[in-house]
Image: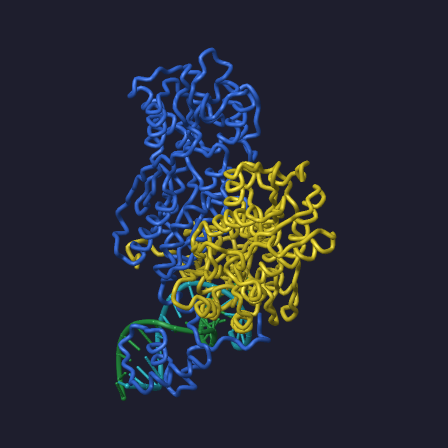
Chain colours: A blue, B yellow, C green, D cyan
Amino acid sequence: MSDVFPPNPTLKDVAQQAGCSAAVASKVLNGSRGNVMVGKATAERVRAIADRLGYRANFAARSLVARSTRTLGLYIWPGQPFANMSGSYESAILRGVDAVTQQAGYDMLLLNTAGPDPLEHCLAKCREGRFDGLLVVRSPADPQWFSQLVRCMPRVVAFDTTAEAPGLDVAMFDHRAAARAAVEYLAEKGHRRIGFIGNTRVPPDELAVGDFAGYERRTGFLDAVQALGLPHRREWIFDYRWQREAVDAQATDYLQAEGAQAVRWMESLDEPPTALVAGVYRSAFGAVPQWQQMGLAVPGDRSLIGLGDRDWCAYFSPSLTNVANPLTEMGQWAASRLIDRCEQRADDAESMRKFFSPQVVERQSAGPVPESQ
Amino acid sequence: MSDVFPPNPTLKDVAQQAGCSAAVASKVLNGSRGNVMVGKATAERVRAIADRLGYRANFAARSLVARSTRTLGLYIWPGQPFANMSGSYESAILRGVDAVTQQAGYDMLLLNTAGPDPLEHCLAKCREGRFDGLLVVRSPADPQWFSQLVRCMPRVVAFDTTAEAPGLDVAMFDHRAAARAAVEYLAEKGHRRIGFIGNTRVPPDELAVGDFAGYERRTGFLDAVQALGLPHRREWIFDYRWQREAVDAQATDYLQAEGAQAVRWMESLDEPPTALVAGVYRSAFGAVPQWQQMGLAVPGDRSLIGLGDRDWCAYFSPSLTNVANPLTEMGQWAASRLIDRCEQRADDAESMRKFFSPQVVERQSAGPVPESQ
DNA sequence: TTGAAAGCGGTACCAT
DNA sequence: ATGGTACCGCTTTCAA
C-alpha cells in the first residue's frame, strides 16, 4: 500500500528504542491489564519515545485480541422510501446518537447497504466483528430477520418495530398517542368534523400488516374521535378507498400529492371536515396549497395538524402545527442503552421496549373552528 | 464478553469440519491471493460447511494482515458553530459521499470528535489504521494541521480550505462566483442599490484570516458591483463596523438576528438598498420578517438573495431565491477521488483542488426593482 | 492440490 | 520490575 510513506511505528519499534520488552511498553502506553509492573523511570522513557515517534496502537491488532471495538454500527434499512443516511428523520435520530457516543468515546460505523440483498448483507457485516452493538433505523417489517440478526449480533437496538427477539431493545413511537393528541388538540379548538389523511399505499384492511405505523395512527384517530363523542363518517378518512387519481408511490413528492388529493376529496363531500389530521406531516405541503387554491384560508376556514415534525416546518406558511416525536431523545436512549450493554452495565439477555410520548408543537396551521360552521 | 452466545465460527472451525487446512479454506472463502490451488470437490465442501455455519472472515484479523480496510473516515471538525453530523450542510455532502461509497462497497467511519483537543484526536485516530482514506468536512482554519495530518494519513480529501499539503485534495466552493452571480441576478432585475449582509463575528480587516469564506464572498460582491458599474456605499455592506446591538455569536439563531439587524441598519439610511445579498442564506429568516414588520413587502419593495441553499428554503414565505453550492455533487467527487487513490487508480503524491460552480435557485424572494425607485 | 509454519501488531500469562 | 512466549484469526510462503 502506502509503502512510500514512513509507516506508523509499532509497539515493537517503541520497545526496541526504549530498550524494554513489548509487554512493558504495552502496559505503559496502552494500559494493558496483564500483571506487569513498570518502574517510573522506564515508564517515562517509553512515553517519551512513543511521543516522539507518534505511536498509536494499531486498531485491528488491538481489537483482534481484546474482542471489543468501542464502535457502534448503524444500519439504515434502505427498503423504505426516503430511507437515507442524510434524511431529516435519520439526522434527528443521529443527533441524539452522536451526542451520546461522543460522550462515551465510541465511534460509529455506517453500514454499507448496497447490493441485491441488503438484509443479508447486514447479517454478514455483523459476523465480521467490526462493532460491539448495532442500531437499526427504518426497521424492516420482517420480524424473522431480527431473530436471525440477534444470533450474529446479540446487542441490537431498533427503532419502531413490533419484532421481538432475545437481546433486542426497541425504541417505539407512540403513534396512537400522537393521533389522539392531534384530535384532542383540534377538539379543544372547537372542531367537531375532523378528518384524517391516511395512507393510499396500502388497502385499509391490510394496514396492520403492511404499514404498522399507519395502522396505529388511524386507530388512535378513531379511538379519540369516539372517546370525545365526535361525529364520524367513513369518507372523512382519506385512504385507499377514496383514491381516484394514480400517484407514483415511490416519488419524492408522493405525500404531498396525497395531501392535495385528500383535500380535493374532502371538499367534494357535502359536509367536509373543518380540520384534518395529516397521518404524515408532509401531506401538509400538498393539502394547504390545495385549500388556498380553492379560496379556503388556513387557518380560518380550515385547520390542519400533522403527525411528525421537522424544525423547518416553522418556515412554511402558515407554519405547521404538528405532533412531534422526540427523535433526538430516542436516539440518545438507544445509544446509551446499547453502550450500557456493551459495557455490561445492562443485562444482555433481557429485552426492553420503550415508548416515547409525542408532543404537540403549536404553530399556526390549526386554528379555532370557523364561526359559520 | 458475550461468551454466553455461540461465538462466530472461525476459519479454523470451517477448515477442521471440512477436513482441510486453513490456507485452503481461506482461498475458497475469502479469495486470498496466496499460490494455493484448490480442487473442485474440496471447494464445494468448504463452501457448504461455511454456509451452514454462517462463516464470515473476522474483520480485524483480515485487515491486520491485509493492511486495508475498505473504509473511509469522516471527520467533521467541531470547531465551527453548527458543525454537526446531522446538520443540513453535512447531510447534503454525506448524501453524495454515501452514494459513491455504497457503490464501491466501502463503509464509513464517523470519527468521534469529543475531548479537549479534537484536532489531535483526529491525528491519533488516523494512526490507528482504521480507515484507508479520510474526508474532512468543516475544515479547521489552521493549515499547519493539514501538514501534520497527511503525515499520519496520506489520503485526505477536505472541503473548502486554503491549506495545501502533499496528498491533500480539496473540494472548493467558489464563493466569489456565488456572490457575483447573486449581484448579477439582482442587477438583471433592475436593482442598482444593492447591499450585502456580511459577518459581524470578524472585523472587516481580519476577514481574510478569520473567515475565508466570508472574505471571498464579500470580495466577489464588491467585484461584481464594480464590474457592473453599480453605485456603492460603505454603509451598504453590513458588518462589524455598523453593528450596534450585541448578539451571542454562538447562538443558533445568530445569523437570523444578524439579518434582522442588518435590515434595521439599511432602512435607517437615507438611501437604503432595494435589494440585499445575504452572505449566508440563513440571514433571510431574520431579514425578511424585519422588513415585513416595517411594512415593506418582499419581494415588491425589497428583494433578497442568499448565498447557500437548502431544499426547505422553498417552504419559507416568500420562498427564498438563493445561490446554491452543489454540496451533494462535491461529496460525490470527494468520495470517488478518495477511493480512486485508495485503489491506486490515482497518484497519491499529487494534490488536486477542484472548484465547484454555484448556481442560482430562482424562487420568490428576489423580484424586480420597485417602480417608484 | 494441499498442509505446516511464520507473521501481521498487539495482550496476557508465566518465568525470572 | 521485567523479558519471553503463546495466541487472537487470517494470509502468505514454502515444502511436500
Q: In the rendered view, does B177 fall on the left or right side of A196?
A: right
Q: Disc count in the image?
A: 0
Toward which corner of the image does residue B211 lie, by quadrant?
bottom right
From what the image shows, is residue C5 above or below residue A316?
below
Residue B24, how many percent across, how many down? Answer: 50, 62
Residue at (33% x, 30% y) in the render: A181
Q: In the rendered view, does B65 fall on the left or right side of A65?
A: right
Residue at (74% x, 53% y) in the render: B229
Residue A185, how many percent across, how many down? Answer: 34, 28
Q: In the rendered view, does B162 fall on the left or right side of A273?
A: right
From what the image shows, is residue B78 above or below residue B94?
below
Q: Quadrant of the C terminus of chain B?
A: top right
**Residue A15 can be seen, yes or no:** yes
Q: In the rendered view, does A58 fall on the left or right side of B322?
A: left
Q: Residue furthest front?
A: B270
> Between B62 and B221, which is closer to the camera in this rendering?
B221
From what the image shows, is residue A185 above or below residue B56?
above
Residue B370, how many percent across, how many down? Answer: 66, 37
**Residue A114 can be seen, yes or no:** no
Q: Residue furthest top?
A: A270
> Between B247 and A262, which is closer to the camera in this rendering?
B247
> Between B8 and B165, which is closer to the camera in this rendering?
B165
> Between A141 and B319, which is closer to the camera in this rendering?
B319
Residue B206, how many percent across, how many down? Answer: 56, 66
Q: Quadrant of the N terminus of chain B?
A: bottom left
